[in-house]
Amino acid sequence: MGSHKKDKCKKSKHKKHKHKKHKRSGDAGDACEATKDRVRAHFLDGNTGPWAKNLAAQDAQTARSAQSEKNADLAEDGAASASDRTAAVTTIRRGPDYSAPSSIDIVADPVLHALSTRRSISKVDPETPNDSDLLEIIRSISSVADHKALRPWRFLIIRGNDRHRLGDALDEAAGVVRKPGETNTKPLRAELLLALVSSPVKHDKVPEWEQHATAAGAGHLLELALWQAGWGVMWRSGTLTNTEPVRRLHRLNDHELLMGWFYIGAVPERYRQRLTTSSRPLPKPEQFLDTL
């Protein structure tokens, strides 16, 4: 019975979608429809963009009805002291207001589409971007939010035999002794690795933790930029990341932090096929959004 209701619901939403599709005009409507068909499963089971607006409005209307009487009491208390108002808000939490339909369509917008469909690719093919490609990628991500423009991050390119050097450093840190001819194969899972180094500087208005956050932001933008450019990537770290042998290999100063490695390569065809048919939805965004 539950499965039947679910199918019925999906058919209903498909019906609404078809009705709205005829209202769209020209190439923009066709492009949006083609994009939605390609990535439907990645967007909350298809309920995004225009299709999500009605659902959000319905949920918000229900919540507003339940809170309307309490909210009216708060409105009448406009002349109360700041402490009284704080106490009232603490007692009666309003929560976000989703009543207004969203004007954002993550299915049609290419940037939001890239954000929503990005996936970590654990096994990439040997082809990699060249160093000039990497330079352009880094240029694109240098707009990362950065308080006082301190640029407290950098990347190190690791290719070829340097990957074996990384494996040796990881073995030294773990106390692993291998037989002659054996090597640590973990750094060999991709032909290209980029190590991310957070390099905070002393500043009286920007604490160290905030600069580490900026470096992490640069790492996330790197993943998105590579994904949009057609490359697969996996951000890896581990308990040995900032051990002395590994830090020495990356020539880190005492105040610097190694934030892991990005394993980069071509996306295997089998992954491309899985991405177009995947049924894994995005997490519900309501869990990440709240009010004071």
Image: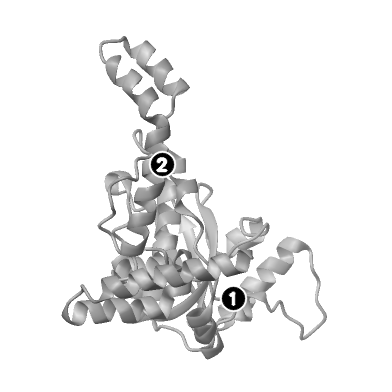
Residue located 31% across and 9% down the image = 81
**What SS does tag 1 mark?**
loop
Image quadrant holding the C terminus, namely: top left
Judge whether residue 224 can be spotted in this image. Answer: no
The one nearer the camera, 265 or 31, is 31
Pointer 2: residues within 10 angstroms few (<14), some, or many (20+)? few
| Residue that protrudes farthest toward the left in the picture | 26
Name the N-terminal-most of marks 1 and 2.
2
Image quadrant holding the N terminus, namely: bottom right
Amino acid at dot 2: Thr
33 relative to 75, above or below? below
- The residue at which mark 2 appears reads as 62
Judge whether residue 269 can be spotted in this image. Answer: yes
Colour pattern of the rendering: one colour
At which x and y percent is residue 163? 59, 77
- Horizontally, residue 90 falls left or right of residue 241, namely left
- The residue at which mark 1 appears reads as 122
The one nearer the camera, 213 or 198, is 213
Residue located 35% across and 63% down the image = 51
